[in-house]
Amino acid sequence: MATLPRRPLRHEAITAEHEKMKLSILIPIFNHDCRELCRSLSQQADAVDADIEIIAAEDGSTDRDCLKLNADIARLPHCRYIVRAQNVGRAAIRNFLADESSGEWLMYMDCDGRVVNTNFLRDYLEAATDCDVVCGGIIHSREYLTDRNRLRYDYEHRSERRFTARARQNDATLPFRTFCFVIRREVFNRIRFDETFRHYGYEDVLFGQKLRQQGARIRHIDNPLENTDLEANDVFVAKTEEALHTLHDHADLFDRDDVRLLGLVRCLDSLHLLPLVRSTGRLLLPTLRTNLAGTRPCTRLFDLYKLGYYCQL
């Protein structure tokens, strides 16, 4: 994945190129109240010299309360709200949103994000020069931490220390995260999301791999979106298991360097150790899962659980 040297950004004014820029902000929604996010983006869109459209689309949401609340999005400036009755999955809904948009630049973000930077859009626009993709990062606040969601919080907080803007810029092997990023439409159209990924997990990693293969120029900045929805420990374990099934079903699509777990499994296989790992896993996995899904999870056991679970597949 091609990367660019980190350079300071100027915040005094948006360049002439940005004044002409048309940016489409694309937000897939599933059973979540997305009004605050859209409202924040709508307010910031008024403050930048760019043509901004915000398109939020329900991907077969079933929560009637959320659907009723989100209907207000259609009344916000710059916003368009689409309700789709059928859930098509994280890859297909993102491709759909791109097809519905008109911007030369596309900004993708998850519906459970919260804007914490008053210059959030401006900073992205200023960074989008001489590059194809801009990634701002993701953060998690302790205000959402409880014993019930400690596993997800601890896992993500540990990742934050590894995924700083400098680290992301300097290490192209770090997994690409689609929680919030901006991409040129022409680059997106050459890649798009793989719609064979119907279930949760790893469609973002494959997208990042394709960016690298295409030689996309990626700029990483410190302009994060905050994740406000931390799943309960048992839900996060179940989602991780679903993601591992997705990885297993699509393993042939990935380069070993893009998924460390695959590299480790292939190494164990070459050493003829997989049978031992599988047999050990069958004994330990129930106990590990009970711990991880409980109220006092040991996060350091999480990677071991993922390895053991994947080897069973």
Image: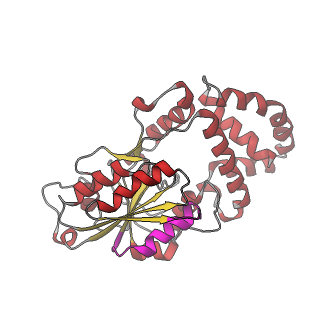
Question: Which quadrant would residue 218 be assigned to in this image?
Answer: bottom left
Q: Magenta region: which residues?
A: 84-105
Q: Nearer the viewer, residue 147 or 305?
A: 147
Q: Is residue 108 above or below residue 166?
A: below
- Residue at the spot x=75%, y=40% of the render? 308
Residue 27: percent from the left, percent from the top? 42, 59
Residue 95 on the magenta span: yes
**Is residue 280 depicted above or below 134 in this figure?**
above
Q: Nearer the viewer, residue 173 or 294?
A: 294
- The verdict on residue 166 being magenta is no
Residue at image coords 74%, 52%: 266
Q: Can the viewer see residue 110 in this picture?
A: no
Q: In this figure, which colouring scheme has been used for the structure? A: secondary structure
Residue at horizontal 30 percent and vertical 64 percent from the top:
128
64 on left or right of 119 = right
Q: Residue 93 in the image: x percent, y percent?
A: 52, 65
Answer left or right for 119 relative to 168.
left
Residue drawn where x is 13% and y is 60% of the image: 13
Percent across and percent down for residue 301 are: 66, 30
State the residue in front, 274 or 289.
289
Residue 104 location, x and y as percent?
Answer: 33, 74
* Residue at the top extreme of this rendering: 296
Rendering quarter of residue 81: bottom left
Whether residue 293 appears in this view of the structure is: yes
Relative placement, left or right, of 237 versus 186 is right
Marker count (numbered): 0
Viewer-proximal residue, 165 or 103? 103
